Every structure is written in C-alpha cells, then in structure tokens.
Amino acid sequence: MEYLLTFPNTHQVMKAESLLNGKGIKTKPMPLPTALGASCGITLRIDEQKVTEGEKILAENKVALSAIYQIHQEDGKKEYWPWKV
C-alpha cells in the first residue's frame, strides 16, 4: 500500500523529495489528484513501510507537510483516505 504526502507549495515538495531520497526513502512525485483539490500541485507517493519514518524526517527538517493520505484502490477506482492532517 502507498501513501500520498501533500505540501503547501512546490518548494516544500522539492525539499521533501531531496531529503527523503537522500535518506534512502524512495518517493514518486505525481500531480495532486483532483479528488483532493482543484489547485495545481505536486505530491509525493511513499511506501507504507516508510511513511512514519518519512514524516519524522520532514518534521525534524522543518518541511511543511499539509496532509498524509492512504491510497485505497478498489474496483479500479482510487480513493484517498486522510491518514494525518
């Protein structure tokens, strides 16, 4: 299962991606799903096993994280369930 990290701006996404990848936590940038808002934005996908560690790294480095969503897929449809906001 994967999780989606959202950020208040592109600068924070880029900082988060660099930090997490530098710590060996693989991330996948993707556009903000329309189900989560109409604004243009970039998010990061992260594996379930690394989400807690990733959140801690971002907090320690003062990276602004808006929310974390669990990506749930059923019958070919993706839903984003709030995990932490």
Image (cartoon, rainbow, N blue to C red):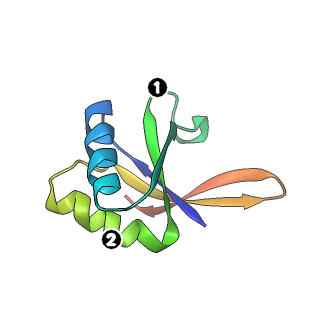
Q: Is residue 81 left or right of residue 8?
A: right
* Rendering quarter of residue 15: top left
Query: Residue at image x 38%, y 53%?
Result: 67
Q: Is residue 46 left or right of residue 15?
A: right
Question: Where does residue 78 sit, x and y in percent of width and height?
Answer: 70, 51
Element type at marker 1?
A: loop
Marks 2 and 1, Cα distance to the nearest angstrom?
A: 27 Å
- Bin the neighbour count of mark 2 within 10 Å (Cα to Cα): few under 14, some 14-19, many 20 and up: few
Element type at marker 2?
A: helix
Q: Which residue is mark 2?
A: 53
> Which kind of residue does numbered mark 1 sit on?
Cys
Q: Quadrant of the N terminus?
A: bottom right
Which badge, 2 or 1, is on the more N-terminal residue? 1
Q: Quadrant of the C terminus?
A: bottom left
* Rendering quarter of residue 13: top left
Question: Where does residue 69 sit, x and y in percent of width and height?
Answer: 49, 57
> Which kind of residue does numbered mark 2 sit on?
Glu
Tell me the number on the disc at residue 56.
Answer: none
Question: Where does residue 22 sit, x and y in percent of width and height?
Answer: 28, 55
Question: Where does residue 57 sit, x and y in percent of width and height?
Answer: 24, 63
Q: Is residue 29 left or right of residue 25?
A: right
Query: Residue at image x 31%, y 38%?
Result: 14
Query: Residue at image x 29%, y 61%?
Result: 23
Q: Which residue is mark 1?
A: 40
Q: Is residue 12 left or right of residue 80?
A: left
* Foreground tag (2 vs 1): 2
- Bin the neighbour count of mark 1 within 10 Å (Cα to Cα): few under 14, some 14-19, many 20 and up: few
Q: Are marks 2 and 1 in contact (CB under 8 Å)?
A: no
Q: Relative to residue 83, is residue 11 depicted above or below?
A: above
